[in-house]
Amino acid sequence: MQITIVPLPDYLVPFLVVVAILTITPGPDMALGLKNGARGGRSAAWWTGLGCCAGIAVHACAAVAGLSAILAASATVFGIVKLAGAAYLIYLGISSWWHSLRRNNSGHSVENRAPAAATRTTAFRQGLLSNLLNPKVVLIFLTLLPQFVASDEPRALTIAELAAIFLLSAVLWWRLFSLLISVLGRTLSRTRVRKAFDRVTGTVLVGFGITMVIENR
């Protein structure tokens, strides 16, 4: 029996390297995952990641359909999305700080209660909105993916394949990230550690939001 080995596309290895770097580079999603993971453990971190991946899937479909190009071409619409995304990150950051301050003024019985932000639904929604309102994700699909499409390849099909690889990489990373949160579960469950995570991640999220507002397109 003869086994036929199908050669890998030329773009696959360099694309995986670029995707790996983009995926593990700290950003708003990771700060959000840490914040929710500190409050709700592995489950909250995982569902935050699933929300982020759902947002990536929406952007991927939009890129394949050509809708992302329309969004990027309109300075007004692009600016609105950018401001909305920045406002949402700042809101999450301030909420994180407010939660830590409330914990300082609460009794032990309130301290030990799991906050609403640790629920699966809330974590998923935050991850989803964080990605949907992030114009940088739009630009990644518009500028990065086409660079790995050869002139003799079907553009839409190849971009769809690259987007699927990008999404799968993100899912695998968030699975690993949530497992790491689980390993740190005992440490993250301590009140002082949760306070510190609330404040650090809150500051980081506000910083990302402000940066999104002031940086050039």
Image: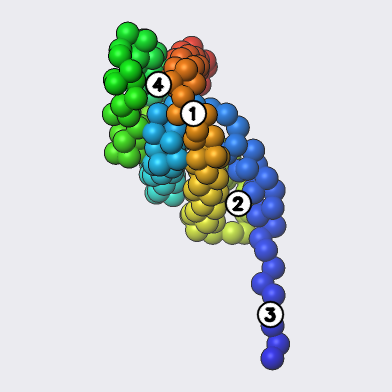
The amino acid at mark 3 is Thr
Q: Position of residue 72 (x, y in %)?
A: 44, 31
CA separation, marks 3 and 1? 50 Å
Mark 1 highlights which residue?
Answer: 188
Q: Nearer the viewer, residue 150 or 165?
A: 165
- Identify residue for label 2: 149
Q: Earlier in the sequence, mark 1 or mark 4?
A: 4
Q: Which-is-in-front pick, marks 4 and 3?
A: 4
Q: Earlier in the sequence, mark 4 or mark 3?
A: 3
Q: Sequence order check: which comes first, mark 2 or mark 1?
A: 2
Q: Earlier in the sequence, mark 4 or mark 2?
A: 4
Disc 4 to disc 2, C-alpha distance: 33 Å
Judge whether residue 87 can be spotted in this image.
no
Colour scheme of the rendered structure: rainbow
SS for dot 1: helix
Residue receiving disc 4: 89
